[in-house]
Amino acid sequence: MIALPAVIFMAFTVPYFISCNEAPSAVQSDHAADSLQEVVDRGKYLALHVAACIHCHSMRDFGKYSGPVIPGTEGGGGNKFSHAEVDDIPGTFYSRNITPDTETGIGTWTDEEVIRAMTQGISKNGDTLFPIMPYPNYNRMAKDDLLSIVAYIRTLKPIKNKVPDRELMIPMSMVYPGPVLQKDVNGNMRPSESDQVKYGEYLVTMGDCSGCHTPFVKGEPDFNRAFAGSIVFRMDGFTVTSANLTPDSTTGIGAWNEEVFIKKFSACREEKGYNYDPDKMNTVMPVVDYSGMTDGDLKAIYAYLRTAKPVKNLVTKYPK
């Protein structure tokens, strides 16, 4: 396989060789470098603020509002998810080390192996991943966005951190593969931003909003009540319930206008919005990460959520 930087470089240099049979100019080299930087920048934006790969694969400081990522742990894994915290998690799982460390991370993985893990839930050694890693969602991502994320995580500082093995309470065969997965993601396309609802659906799928905001019944998400909230997270020092994101006017966000929705996130764009100890009034939702989304992307998400079926479901955010 040709690595991503090489693909981009060839895309710009091969036509030059064909037409001139001379060495590529400095301008063309700069063009290739700029194009690669654009890919990495897109991947960084998605990994930090939309798909939020970094908040799951790093350690978080819940002494601050929304548990921002602890500097220096980016991508090193070890974030714990367990049945003790959420009833519907059947065991204990740890996010994997996705830094380029060659011993404990993904430094020896090819781009294709990383994308297979992201979209098929199959690791380099053939193990299946538990779908707390939302590979069914990433299975719907545009191939260029997947490659952008891979390009970005290649730039992370290598962290030597051997993550503990998972401890399953059920056979893995009960949850894998789960939803029908496309075997080939090459045909996936990112919707036009001009179609605000479709583009918003794309972002919501990438962000796996449904995973935390759709109630579970007997271990399965109840999609008849999609986005209705009610998942309880029992964390050290606080307990919080996911919100009802449906457009129900009394128990959901039906009474919110676009400006109110955006302010829910933009308040954390400045350090003063999260750099304090909220005590028992904290949240597991990575608002700090999502606050980095553009207003345009937040507007698209709002537009899509307005199309969801209204579900009357009163949520007690901080149950005793």
Image (tube, rainbow, N blue to C red):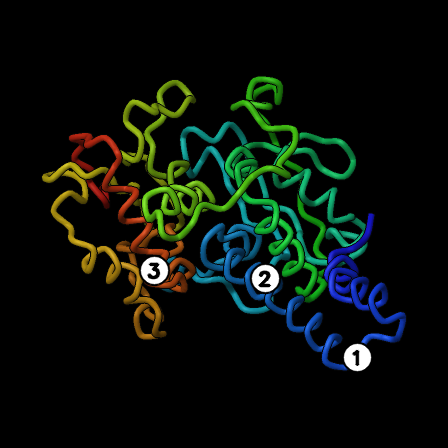
Image: 34 above or below 225: below
Q: Earlier in the sequence, mark 3 or mark 1?
A: 1
Q: Secondary structure at mark 3?
A: helix
Q: Can you identify the residue that label 3 sits on?
A: 296
Q: Quadrant of the C terminus?
A: top left
How much space separates mark 3 and mark 1, taking CA atoms?
A: 37 Å
Q: Earlier in the sequence, mark 1 or mark 2?
A: 1
Displayed quadrant of residue 87 = top left
The amino acid at mark 1 is: Ser
- Of residues 229 and 36, the one nearer the viewer is 36
Answer left or right for 169 relative to 67: right
Q: Can you identify the residue that label 2 sits on?
A: 74
Q: Are there few (<14), some (14-19), or many (20+) residues within 10 Å of tag 1? A: few
The residue furthest front is 19
Image: 118 above or below 287: above
Q: Can you identify the residue that label 1 sits on?
A: 25
Residue contact at pointers 3 and 2, CB within 8 angstroms: no
Q: Indicate the position of residue 230 as horizontal and vertical percent values.
A: 28, 34
Q: Indicate the position of residue 304 as horizontal and vertical percent values.
A: 30, 43
Displayed quadrant of residue 49 = bottom left
Q: Indicate the position of residue 203 as horizontal and vertical percent values.
A: 42, 47
How much space separates mark 1 and mark 2, taking CA atoms?
A: 37 Å
Q: Secondary structure at mark 1?
A: loop
Q: Indicate the position of residue 253 as horizontal and vertical percent values.
A: 18, 44
